[in-house]
């Protein structure tokens, strides 16, 4: 399994928004959407602010593949739902969204509608 480079992790820790573009089986992209990401200890997390019915989230979950794009480059990722996430990890993700993005918007990322869509983004 591939691992994030230290440079990618620093970048993802600092970047405000990334575009996530779900990829079809043949690699053709669907429309993308700007999202927020948080990272710690070599793991990168995202949530769908508007819940599981949003197109980017639904399609990324269907195929398990997406591309993160910023002005500085792109990373192909696999998208994994983490229902086994322990309460310590969930609490850290909640706190990191608040730290990184501040009030009032980040509070909504910690409501059940969004927190239930927590996915881990793994490098390809």
Image (tube, rainbow, N blue to C red):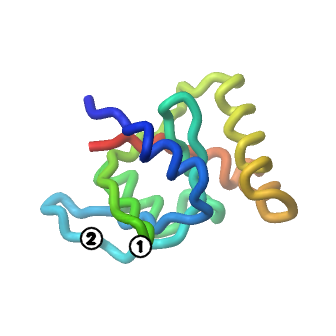
Residue at the right extreme, as displayed:
104
Q: Where is residue 45 in the image (x, y as percent from the top left)?
A: 54, 44
Task: Note whether 74 is above or below 91 in the view shown.
Answer: below
Residues under numbered marks 2 and 1 in contact, where contact means CB atoms less than 8 Å apart: yes
Q: Nearer the viewer, residue 51 or 69?
A: 69
Total number of numbered labels?
2
**Image quarter of the N terminus:** top left
Task: Note whether 88 is above or below 121 in the view shown.
Answer: above
Residue shown at 51% from the left, 51% from the top: 11
Few, some or many residues within 10 Å of mark 2 (<14, 14–19, 20+)? some
Q: Which residue carries the number 2 mark? A: 29
Q: Which residue carries the number 1 mark? A: 32
Q: Where is residue 37 in the image (x, y as percent from the top left)?
A: 57, 52
Residue shown at 53% from the left, 70% from the top: 34
**Image quarter of the C terminus:** top left
Residue shown at 64% from the left, 65% from the top: 50
Residue at the left extreme, as displayed:
26
Q: Is residue 26 left or right of residue 40?
A: left
């Amino acid at each position: 399994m591939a691992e994030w480079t230290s440079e990618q992790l620093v970048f993802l820790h600092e970047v405000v928004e990334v575009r996530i573009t779900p990829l079809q089986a043949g690699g053709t992209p669907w429309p993308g959407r700007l999202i927020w990401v948080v990272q710690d200890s070599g793991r990168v997390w995202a949530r769908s602010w508007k819940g599981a019915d949003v197109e980017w989230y639904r399609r990324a979950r269907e195929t398990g593949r997406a591309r993160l794009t910023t002005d500085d480059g792109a990373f192909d990722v696999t998208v994994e739902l983490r229902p086994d996430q322990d309460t310590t990890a969930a609490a850290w993700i909640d706190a990191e969204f608040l730290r990184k993005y501040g009030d009032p918007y980040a509070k909504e990322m910690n409501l059940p509608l969004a927190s239930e869509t927590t996915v881990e983004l793994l490098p390809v």
